[in-house]
Every structure is written in C-alpha cells, then in structure tokens.
Image: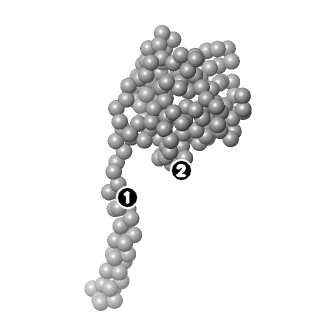
Amino acid sequence: MTQPLMTRLLGAMALLCVVALPCAAADDEEPFVEAGWQTPAAPQDADLLPFYTSLSGLSFAVDAKSLTIDKDGVARFTMVATSKSGAKNVSYEGLRCATMERKLYAVGSADGSWTRARDPQWLPIAIAGSTVPHGTLAKEYICKDSRIPGKATAIVNDLRYHRSPFSPQT
C-alpha cells in the first residue's frame, strides 16, 4: 500500500472514531428501568377531574386519587372516557415525558376490578386519533421540557382548577 493511500485510510478511520464517540457516550447513559406498579382502587365519580380534549364524542377525566409520579419518571393514572350515552371506559396508564410515550397497564370493569393488559408496550403519543387525550395530558398538564417538573398534587390542582391555556374555564 502506498504512503498517501495509507495516510488517507488512517485519516478516514480517525474521522470515523471521532464521529462514533458521541454515539458511544450516549450508549453509556443509564437505561430506562421501569418501577413496579399496582392497580389503584376503582375510580369514584367524586374524584374524577375532567379535562378538555378536541376528540369529539367522548369526555375524559383523570382520577385524582390514582395519579402518581414515580421514581422512574413515569406519571401513572386512571383515565375515564365517557361517551355521550354515559358508557365508560376505564384504564390505568403510564406516561413518559422523556420519550412522549404512553403505556396501557390495565382496563377497569364495571364491578371495580382490573384486567391487566396482555402485552403492555410503550407506544408513541400522536396528536391525532385515540392518543389525543394522552397528548393533552402530556402537553398541558404533566410534561414540561421532556420531564415532569412538579409533584402529583400540583398536577391534580392544575386539572382541578383547569390551569391549562387550552382548557375552557369552568
């Protein structure tokens, strides 16, 4: 191999190493380890905090007593979706601000019991479709700059007093 070719090859390899260093450093970050969780008590109507979402046909609320901010940085809560006819869907879910993802842990039954999700996965929160309520909670109440800055009591108070720039004042 000629000297100029060898010099270029070594230079290219050095450049690759420099470019790869940030990736290697990113790999050294602590991996996400999810905390253990338990389903809360079934929600009571008196504890439901409604919040506005653009998804028509359903109204949404969070159970104030179920909202927790855990050490893993996940906000966990019971959400109740109510149709215009009064039918309710109850779910226990998690929200990660760092990745703007949500996870369904369990679905509530009319008798107050829970059925765990078969294969709970972290899924991206979209701004359209069935994840509109999750996006609303994340952007207006729970997440600030990819993290949860406050305590659960502060988020509950914001929901209770409609402290969101997009929620109708009641």
Q: Is residue 52 left or right of residue 97?
A: right
User: Which amino acid is tagged 2?
Assistant: Asp
Q: Nearer the viewer, residue 89 or 157?
A: 157
User: Residue 32, can we see it?
Assistant: yes
Across and down, in percent, residue 144 comes to 55, 47
Is 42 placed above or below 168 here? above
Across and down, in percent, residue 104 comes to 46, 30
Across and down, in percent, residue 142 comes to 54, 39
Q: Residues within 10 Å of mark 1 (few under 14, many from 20)?
A: few
Could you say which quadrant of the image residue 137 lies in?
top right
Mark 1–mark 2 Cα distance, whole angstroms, equals 19 Å
Q: Nearer the viewer, residue 11 or 45?
A: 45
Q: Nearer the viewer, residue 49 or 125?
A: 49
Could you say which quadrant of the image residue 36 lies in?
top left
Task: Return the residue found at the far left.
Answer: 1
| Proximity of marks 1 and 2: CB atoms separated by less than 8 Å | no
Q: Which one is earlier in the sequence, the residue at label 1 or at label 2?
A: 1
Task: Return the residue found at the far right.
Answer: 169
Q: Residue at x 53, y 50 (%)?
A: 145
On residue 26, the disc is: 1
Is 77 placed above or below 97 here? above
Q: Nearer the viewer, residue 19 or 45?
A: 45
* Location of mark 2 (residue): 145
Where is the C terminus found, in terms of image quarters? top right
Please tell me whether mark 1 sits on a helix, a strand or a loop.
Answer: helix
User: Residue 129, can we see it?
Assistant: no
Q: Is residue 62 left or right of residue 167?
A: left
